[in-house]
Image (cartoon, rainbow, N blue to C red):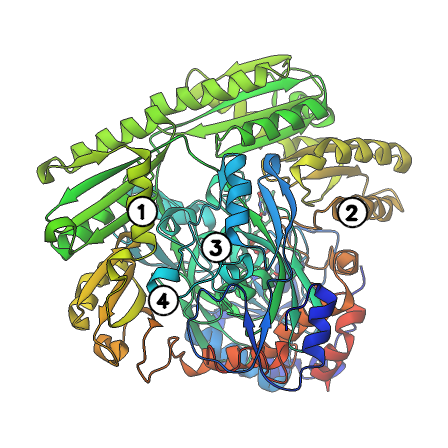
Amino acid sequence: MQMPEPDARVLSRKAQIVARLRGVLPADAVIEDAMETRAYECDALTAYRCPPLCAVLPSSTEEVAAVLTICHEEGVPVVPRGSGTSLAGGALPTADSVILGVARMNAVLETDYANRIIRVQTGRTNLSVTGAVEEGDFFYAPDPSSQLACAIAGNIAMNSGGAHCLKYGVTTNNLLGVTMVLMDGTVVELGGAHLDAGGLDLLGVICGSEGQLGVVTEATLRILRKPEGARPVLMGFAANEVAGECVSDIIKAGVLPVAIEFMDRPCIEATEAFAKAGYPMCEALLIVEVEGSEAEIAEQLGLILQIARRHNPVELREARDADEAARIWLGRKSAFGAMGQINDYMCLDGTIPVSALPQVLRRIGEMSKEFGLDVGNVFHAGDGNMHPLILFDANKPGDLELCERFGAEILKLCVEVGGCLTGEHGVGIEKRDLMTVQYTPEDLEVQMAVKDVFDPQWLLNPAKVFPLAASETRRAVAAE
Amino acid sequence: MRPETETELAEAIKTAQGPLHVRGGGTRAIGRTTGALLETGGLSGIVLYEPGALTLVARAGTPLAEIEAALEAEGQRLPFEPMDHRALLGTSGAPTVGGMAAANVSGPRRVQAGACRDYMLGVRFVDGAGRILRNGGRVMKNVTGYDLVKLMAGSWGTLGVLTEVAFKVLPKPEAVATVLLEGLEIGGAVTAMSAALGSPYDLTGAAHLPDGPEGTPRTLLRIEGFSDSVGYRAERLCAQFAARGPRVETDPERNAALWRDLRDVAPFHERAGDVWRISCKPSDAPALAARLGAEALLFDWGGGLIWALVPEGGDARARLGAFAGHATLVRGAAAVPVFQPEPAPVAALSAGLRARFDPRGILNPGLMA
Ligand SMILES: Cc1cc2nc3c(=O)[nH]c(=O)nc-3n(C[C@H](O)[C@H](O)[C@H](O)COP(=O)(O)OP(=O)(O)OC[C@H]3O[C@@H](n4cnc5c(N)ncnc54)[C@H](O)[C@@H]3O)c2cc1C
């Protein structure tokens, strides 16, 4: 994966730049030592690494503004960072960039149950937002699998989703307001405890902009009252197609489960070997979870099981208690880890129309043979967000590249059947060069024009999202 | 001008000599603009509808009624419950998909399900330079590039003319019930609605009419879902508000009428005066409403949305003073900005976006600014 050449003039002025940053931040908030900056050389896309010029860890919106003002004046690129769990290389630095980490900004600023909101600094982790409102029996709905580690900052930048977003939506549907600092140090407030924008929906554009439009320092999030209960059911099928049809029938029947998760045979086998959740050995497995009171759960599950039976399941397993429920989720939750036990893997994230599921799974199986790399599929089936995990051996020369080529073919297939390159992980550097598969040059041009408005010098996370060739002239202006 | 294809539309915009007034059905005539009429009605028809994937794609000029009929046939609906502005604004014509999307029109269910923008999966549009552009797609999860779908929702045709919109739709629930509480003061009503919305019973509507039937204030709490579940939750809500002598409306037709009236602000129909729509933090609503000197009020979204009927020509914003939220002059002749003026840095960003999407400033000029 190509990254732009670092700006030699920035590299040569490192000492002055660091000195100026030290002037506005506490001593321990500026990290320039080569050993220590290593901690910021990559995110969860670990195949790509580069230590930054330095890293800063501000504690307030004011400090963020002071840092950005300096970097703006000095013409230094800035890469915002939450917890560094991006799978797309969104937080990958370049040698001439300052990593701006918001990890120290993790305070809860306000919890308001009457208005059903919480306001936090964005360095706070996703799970600890729910943690902060649990005593009131509330929760924050978007639940990426990385929720123990990932920060609200990264969630907003990537518009992250989770297993339960079939019912509750993704980050953008649960984000009510932000405090954001523009690259020139201007502080902007968008939205708040009220609903919808009074003018253009800038908040909607910020969410999912991958740290390229501003540094988000505070967020107002919608919180919801916890349902009375939740329960999953597990079903096994003899073919992917049948499981796909069952998903479609459940949705059509008017039940709205909170989650419909899908695992295929390679993934079931790996998971069983690893987590021993007691899954049936079959071609495809669905986990469907519903919520409500006891009676409501029973009613919905009754309907779902009735639909499932029409598709001749090889297994139907209801959870009779919390323990059995946990066992049903156990395999799904350890799927990534299980695949990781077998080999290195690359996790893709294309989304397809639910109706194209069987066709796409079949093609992926064929391609797996063509490329000679194994693939397991585990994903959010209700909304068609696939997660093919391609296994490869990082120590084998050429295997990573082969895997990337295979991955690109799968993503192209997703676009071909009417879907998209990424459903929740973001473009970052990983899918940057595939953007032309989904968008025309003009479609990309108008997106880049949005960045021109927020960050005319293209200093914020400049080498991401857009193919380098497409953004080249704009980035060149920054370097002048 | 009434182009029949996207290409014709692009040509019309490219060759336009002056401002264009973009119009779908013309039923949501909010704000002021000038220019040659550019109608989208020629771009009509459902492009794709997959009930099993909860996806519907339609051309911008498609009458909303056509969409609703197609969804109804499959037992589905647009979950955000778009309001019909005709009676309130005294307009006629048929609301279109594009007009609804461009105005980000939602209704009472917005408080639970989300707004129109939350159900928009993708758009095609022609910008002010005549470029045919696309963003988003037709799948339910998509973070590929910037989300210009949200930007187009609620941009009132000032950034581009929508030609096609893809929506996520949802199944219609089996049953509906409304718990009615009578006689609450505005403050008490907002507190009650907050408590109900903060319960586990998943309300899909919470509204308050200070002048209910026979002049008695009325608070309405709606629940939807499978019959047994609705029955159970209605019972629990009644228990929660036992002191208020709750009553439950379960008749589907009467429920539909109740919420249609709220959605369309029926109490203000055929009454003179300016109509303001105020989005605020629910708990601020009682104090804000008190400052308005309104002739009539309606509270939706648990208090988060205030509809106010005020004497003609007044400036409700001046009365409200600084507050967290925004006020729109939906109907009226007051010489004030129709949309909430933005703080300088936000206004600069909005103006910058307009300049990029519509460099000649010809699309509904002045409408939002
Ligand atoms: C095991 C595992 C499971 C995962 N599961 C899911 C899942 O289920 N669903 C899902 O959606 N994702 C998932 N992810 C991906 C990842 O966790 C999310 O993208 C997450 O939101 C990233 O958050 P972060 O705080 O770690 O951000 P980082 O990785 O630090 O940064 C991500 C992006 O956000 C930008 N950014 C960071 N802070 C700011 C800020 N303050 N202002 C502006 N931009 C900023 C960065 O520049 C970067 O582009 C998973 C990752 C892992 C490793």
Q: Are marks 1 and 4 in contact (CB under 8 Å)?
A: no
Residue lying at 59% horizontally and 29% vertically, measured from the top left: A332
- Residue B313 is situated, as x and y percent measured from the top left of the image, at 26, 81
Q: Nearer the viewer, mark 4 or mark 3?
A: 4
Distance CA(mark 4)–CA(mark 3): 20 Å
The lab-note entry on whether marks 3 and 1 share a chain reads: yes
In the displayed structure, A156 sits above or below A306; it is below
What residue would you read off at disc 2? A416
Disc 3 residue type (three-letter): Cys
Q: Are marks 2 and 3 in contact (CB under 8 Å)?
A: no
Q: Is residue B148 left or right of residue A478?
A: left
First reached walking from the N terminus: tag 1 or tag 4: 4
Callout 1: residue from which chain? B
- Secondary structure under the numbered disc 2 in the rendered image: helix
Distance CA(mark 1)–CA(mark 4): 18 Å
Distance CA(mark 2)–CA(mark 1): 42 Å
* Mark number displayed over residue B116: 3
Callout 3: residue from which chain? B
What residue would you read off at disc 4? B89
Residue lying at 59% horizontally and 27% vertically, measured from the top left: A249
Callout 2: residue from which chain? A
Q: Nearer the viewer, mark 2 or mark 3?
A: 3
What residue would you read off at disc 1? B259
* Of residues A369 and B55, the one drawn nearer to the viewer in this rendering: B55
Disc 4 residue type (three-letter): Leu
* Of residues A351 and B262, the one drawn nearer to the viewer in this rendering: B262
Residue at the far front: name it: B92
Mark 3 surroundings: few (<14), some (14-19) or many (≥20) residues within 10 A: many
Residue B337 image-quadrant placement: bottom left
Quadrant in which the N terminus of chain B appears? bottom right
- Secondary structure under the numbered disc 1 in the rendered image: helix
